[in-house]
Image (cartoon, grey):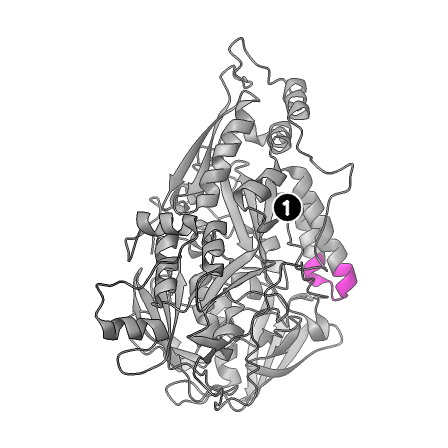
């Protein structure tokens, strides 16, 4: 876990979104970078003994096991489902524990998970879930509705157990299990996310022994008891997480003998490992890396519309629910005119063309175009277009004029200058930061780009002016919408809230409350778009781009694998449940205990896929997180 600025304690949610891994590791380097830029293939290391080269090339362990190794660039914040919020952690939990429902890989509608059926009462205040009778914990105990009821009630009664996913249960009155196959959830008011509760169900007989949930990271005893398709067998901080197939999983056991998520701080090192066959899969590729890998033997590049947005976030003044202010954000950013002028001087087209080199779509609303039901675009009169001249006029009219030296002055008479938090390991942040220095410099505004391994500490403390921000959105956007509500602010300056960047706006909150209770999918989508419009107009968030999911895997290790969605979708993220469960090893006939694995071969495409309809009632799913969460 990354330590937080005293006196507050670490917030996994914050780390999830912004923090890049902070340790040392593996492979390297300048040579790898040079080779990638040149578009060449890095050969197997000649210093490796021949048996090790052969082993690396086919993804086999020394004992002959077929190992699926996934390169990850983010640290595990916690192996506790009650604390974890980083993308890699929540992805692991999706594999190790069952949720009540899952998302269909074709169109993301709700499909059975731990629950096989669900039904709301007429007033929508009571939900009854039928819990499957063929799920067992990996220690052999039967998994029942009592485990689900205990999980939810623990989150209701212990604030420390609600750190990661408390927004899902905040509206619950109570959960009961009248029998092993029946879960009843009573609500305070209707809730539109009831078939999209991204909450890992844990075994009561294990977790009821835990004392302080704020300190228990679930990383002292392996294997970890779960009921998902995989079982967590080992973990080393900033090195790896290892999982084995759960042979008793009701959907059928995964086909690889082992799944390893291996941490690489350096993206070039991860790509070099992919080329050598030391890893099976790598994500978050740069355009140069993707171009080099397309010509590499036995490697398939998947370049598909992503579910992430890439944005600038402003600090509107860090504060807590008790009204106390903290942090050292620049006072000028509280002025809507300053925020508007800054965004008028951001050339989104250049960001897409020059930084992402075409592997992205120009940003507009808060929800990426992949999610068609919720995708919103500003009207022509509302749109903040790139117009440096208009930006200068906006500042002039608001009283921020230049002095004789060309410096823009604040209301205090001092030259305007801001700081922006940047992920030290993210080349996109650094590249965009240079453009911002140029664009805003022409307005007479200075910018200091502060690239850190750990951006969580200053962000949580409110010690920043602007920051590079980004979340991955799940089919139901409730979570990424909730992090901008007043209720997500920390209770006191000493606490860790769920807020993204301290936004608190009554109009936005009113719309959030309405959409969270709206069961009609069309009406709910309309309310969500109004929220996006309000967020856009306040100027607290400037979505610059929707990056593609650019990833690659070795075809000599993976014969077939399912993307999410199946048509032009991606592999990495919480969607990865289907990817890693369905993956078929190369040199395999595809046979397995599973009766339902599709083993779809990836189709590469850059066309924007609209994941239709989302919504609740029978076919609703949920939320954003985290890649969110990332």
Q: Is residue 628 left or right of residue 544?
A: left
Asked if the stretch drawn in magenta spans residue 475, the answer is no
Q: Is residue 436 above or below residue 506?
A: above
Q: Which residue is mark 1?
A: 363
Quadrant that contains the N terminus: bottom left
Q: Which residues are magenta?
A: 515-524
- Pick the front one: 203 or 274: 274
Q: Is residue 254 above or below residue 108?
A: below
> Residue at image x 61%, y 44%?
543
- Residue 73 rendering spot, x and y as whole percentages: 40, 57
- Residue 516 rendering spot, x and y as whole percentages: 68, 60
Q: Is residue 572 left or right of residue 26?
A: right
- Residue 608 rendering spot, x and y as whole percentages: 67, 58
Q: Is residue 224 left or right of residue 576?
A: left
Q: Is residue 508 above or below residue 473?
A: above
Q: Is residue 341 visible?
A: yes
> Residue at image x 47%, y 50%?
288
- Residue 570 rendering spot, x and y as whole percentages: 55, 65
């Amino acid at each position: 876990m990354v330590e937080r600025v005293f006196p507050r304690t670490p917030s996994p949610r914050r780390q999830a979104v912004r923090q890049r891994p902070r340790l040392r590791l593996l492979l390297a380097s300048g040579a790898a970078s040079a080779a990638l830029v040149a578009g060449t293939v890095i050969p197997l290391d000649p210093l490796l003994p021949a048996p090790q080269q052969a082993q690396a090339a086919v993804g086999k362990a020394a004992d002959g096991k077929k190992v699926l190794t996934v390169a990850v660039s983010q640290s595990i914040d916690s192996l506790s489902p009650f604390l974890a919020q980083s993308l890699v952690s929540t992805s692991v939990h999706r594999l190790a524990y069952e949720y009540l429902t899952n998302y269909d890989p074709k169109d993301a509608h709700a499909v059975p998970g731990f629950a096989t059926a669900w039904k709301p009462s007429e007033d929508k205040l009571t939900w009854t879930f039928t819990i499957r009778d063929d799920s067992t914990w990996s220690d052999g105990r039967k998994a029942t509705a009592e485990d689900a009821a205990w999980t939810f009630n623990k989150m209701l009664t212990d604030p420390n157990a609600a750190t990661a996913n408390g927004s899902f249960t905040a509206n619950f009155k109570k959960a009961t299990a009248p029998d092993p196959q029946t879960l009843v959830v009573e609500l305070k008011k209707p809730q539109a996310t009831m078939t999209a509760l991204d909450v890992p169900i844990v075994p009561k007989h294990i977790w009821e022994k835990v004392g302080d949930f704020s300190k228990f990271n679930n990383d002292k005893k392996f294997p970890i008891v779960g009921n998902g398709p995989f079982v967590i067998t080992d973990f080393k901080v900033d090195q790896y997480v290892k999982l084995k197939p759960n042979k008793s999983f009701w959907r059928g056991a995964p086909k690889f003998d082992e799944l390893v998520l291996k941490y690489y701080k350096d993206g070039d090192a991860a790509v070099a490992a992919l080329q050598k066959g030391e890893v099976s899969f790598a994500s978050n590729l740069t355009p140069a890396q993707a171009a080099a890998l397309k010509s590499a033997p036995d490697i398939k590049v998947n370049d598909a519309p992503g579910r992430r947005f890439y944005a600038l976030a402003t600090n509107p003044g860090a504060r807590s629910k008790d009204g106390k202010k903290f942090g050292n954000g620049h006072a000028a950013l509280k002025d809507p005119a300053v925020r508007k002028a800054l965004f008028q001087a951001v050339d989104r087209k250049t960001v897409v063309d020059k930084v992402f080199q075409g592997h992205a779509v120009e940003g507009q609303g808060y929800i990426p175009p992949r999610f068609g039901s919720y995708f919103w675009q500003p009207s022509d009169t509302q749109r903040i277009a790139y117009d440096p001249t208009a930006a200068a006029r906006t500042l002039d009219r608001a009283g921020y004029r230049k002095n004789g030296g060309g410096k823009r002055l604040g209301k205090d008479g001092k030259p305007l200058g801001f700081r922006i938090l940047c992920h030290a390991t993210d080349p996109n942040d650094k590249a965009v930061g240079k453009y911002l220095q140029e664009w805003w410099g022409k307005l007479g505004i200075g910018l200091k780009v502060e690239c850190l391994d750990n951006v969580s500490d200053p962000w949580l403390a409110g010690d920043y002016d602007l920051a590079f921000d980004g979340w991955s959105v799940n089919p139901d956007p409730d979570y990424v919408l909730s992090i901008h509500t007043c209720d997500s602010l920390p209770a006191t300056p000493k606490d860790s809230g769920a807020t993204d960047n301290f936004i608190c706006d009554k109009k936005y909150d009113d719309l959030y409350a309405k959409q969270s209770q709206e069961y009609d999918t069309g009406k709910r989508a309309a309310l969500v778009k109004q929220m996006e419009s309000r967020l856009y107009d306040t100027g607290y968030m400037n979505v610059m781009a929707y990056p593609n999911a650019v990833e690659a895997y070795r075809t000599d290790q993976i014969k077939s694998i399912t993307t999410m969605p199946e048509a032009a979708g991606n592999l990495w993220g919480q969607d990865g449940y289907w990817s890693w469960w369905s993956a078929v090893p190369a040199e395999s006939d595809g046979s397995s205990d599973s009766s339902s694995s599709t083993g779809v071969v990836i189709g590469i495409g850059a066309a924007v896929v609209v994941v239709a309809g989302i919504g609740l009632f029978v076919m609703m799913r949920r939320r954003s997180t985290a890649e969110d969460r990332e």
